[in-house]
Image (spheres, coloured by chain):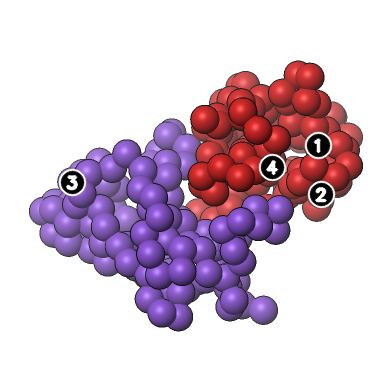
Chain colours: A purple, B red
Amino acid sequence: EAGVTQSPTHLIKTRGQQVTLRCSPISGHTSVYWYQQALGLGLQFLLWYDEGEERNRGNFPPRFSGRQFPNYSSELNVNALELEDSALYLCASIIRRDRPNYGYTFGSGTRLTVV
Amino acid sequence: AQSVTQLGSHVSVSEGALVLLRCNYSSSVPPYLFWYVQYPNQGLQLLLKYTSAATLVKGINGFEAEFKKSETSFHLTKPSAHMSDAAEYFCAVISSGGSYIPTFGRGTSLIVHP
């Protein structure tokens, strides 16, 4: 089965621009999580989508937003990019939110560089 | 609330030596615990998981971890390090019946010397 796929793999943007990152979960997985991995800061929880709804968001400003589509794929939007937004953005999926015992599968990430 | 602490941002071992990466968690309810590995410029790959069955969990690539409730620990071990084990390792916790959002530790970089 295909894993979690993310696009694009790399992206360079200018400060102040907007960016959209995409994630396709494993077929049948309904829950999608977004994490930011900035250098030296580990994984910071950004957003959680489940069954098409935003269920929770981390401690990030409103310029970070996203949505989940009927096919459970998801996109992450970041407006008014700042230099500190440079990071690896990781998407993970799980078959159902109440089945953590199945484990979370991660994509390879999108490397965003803001200059 | 749930949290994870990984002791040591870097661990250095010689090839063939024992690998021990430490993880302590905090959870008000029985947790699910995970270890992930991240190779450079890649995503996270699941090594193993504890889901309230056996307390000693075996994973891929010869790694294993033991859940110790009394110590709130879930340390990762491997009897003999290989050069290919050099990577970043993350411990994660999620509380059963909780927020369904995994919380990750800051990560431990494993360095393997020849």
Residue B34 in sight here: yes
What residue would you read off at disc 2? B59
Q: Are marks 3 and 1 in contact (CB under 8 Å)?
A: no
Looking at the picture, tell me which residue is in the foreground, B22 or A70: A70
Residue at screen point 59% across, 63% down: A96
Q: Are marks 1 and 2 in contact (CB under 8 Å)?
A: yes
Helix, strand or loop for disc 4: strand
What residue would you read off at disc 3? A82
Which amino acid, mark 2? Answer: Gly
Chain for numbered disc 3: A
Q: CA distance from mark 4 to mark 1?
A: 13 Å
Q: Earlier in the sequence, mark 2 or mark 4?
A: 4
Helix, strand or loop for disc 3: loop
What residue would you read off at disc 1? B65
Helix, strand or loop for disc 2: loop
Image quadrant in which you'd find residue B74: top right
Image quadrant in which you'd find residue B8: top right
For label 3, the crowd category at 10 Å Cα-Cα, with few meaning under 14, some 14 to 19 and many 20 or more, is: some
What residue would you read off at disc 4? B32
Q: CA distance from mark 1 to mark 2?
A: 8 Å
Q: Is residue A1 left or right of residue A75?
A: right
